[in-house]
Amino acid sequence: MTDSIVRLENLSKRFSKDRPAIFEGVDLTVRAGEYLAVMGESGVGKSTLLNLLAGLDRTDSGRVLLEGVDLATLNDDEVTLLRRRAVGFVFQAFHVLPYLSVEQNVALPLDLLGIREPQRGERARDMLRAVGIEALARRHARELSGGEIQRVAIARALVHRPRLVLADEPTGNLDTGSATQILSLLRAQIKANAGAGILITHSRMAADTADRILVLDAHGLRALEPMQ
């Protein structure tokens, strides 16, 4: 596939005018079906880059184009609507609501998009089946293990079939065995959904599950070859 899901053009970001840019000159094109990893030292701006990709923060210069739309041309409400439809998030801290059932958590993005029952429930259960936790649908999130909660987070990120999935250190709180399973599941589901995925990680093991690895520093992004 060759269609661009997201494109960054000469992107730069700084927190204040009297401080150096966190990064500058960032160029990136991510196409449908592509899954890439972004690595870099702590404080280099990996999470900031993710926020810019999702329109949660505004760039100082350069452009972010999501599905061909320049985010700078949209107002806050328009960015929110585009993000709600086109982007899915997987976080290290999960952000799963403990007082809701697993199915209710997964269905939240569909609810925000105005998808009603029975379609909402059917799609949530289909996604739970895809990540292997359909049997936990009625359980509350507070009753689950870390690995199970992360599967809920992946299901929630993918249930509305987003074009772009952003994963910020999604396995940082998991043991090695659970992390390996989650990374494999995340990659498989992104590919099955025909979207694109960007993984932010400190772990070379996690990064090696991606199609390509990029390293972020103050001067932009550079390619890193996967280990053989």
Image: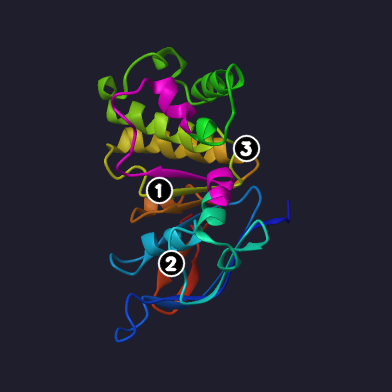
Q: Residue visible at 54% across and 31% down?
A: 110
Residue 209 visible, this orientation: yes
Q: Which residues are magenta?
A: 81-108
Crowding at mark 3 (Cα within 10 Å: few <14, some 14-19, many 20+): some
Vertical side of 193 occupied by 12: above or below: below
Q: Nearer the viewer, residue 13 or 58?
A: 58
Judged from this view, the residue extending furthest toward the right is 2
For the residue pair 31 and 63, the one nearer the viewer reads as 63
Q: Residue at x 30, y 84 (%)?
A: 19
* Residue 145 coordinates in the image, percent (x, y): 28, 25
Q: Amino acid at mark 2?
A: Val
Question: Residue 215 — which label?
Answer: 2
**In the image, is 102 to the left or to the right of 174?**
right
Secondary structure of residue under mark 3: loop
Q: Image check: 178 left or right of 119? A: left
Q: As drawn, which residue projects farthest toward the bottom? A: 18
User: Residue type at mark 3?
Assistant: Asn
Q: CA distance from mark 2 to mark 1?
A: 14 Å
Q: Are marks 2 and 1 in contact (CB under 8 Å)?
A: no
Disc 2 crowd rating (10 Å Cα; few below 14, some 14-19, many 20+) is some
Q: Earlier in the sequence, mark 1 or mark 3?
A: 3
**Disc on res. 206:** 1
Name the amino acid, label 1: Ala
Which mark is first along the chain, 3 or 2? 3
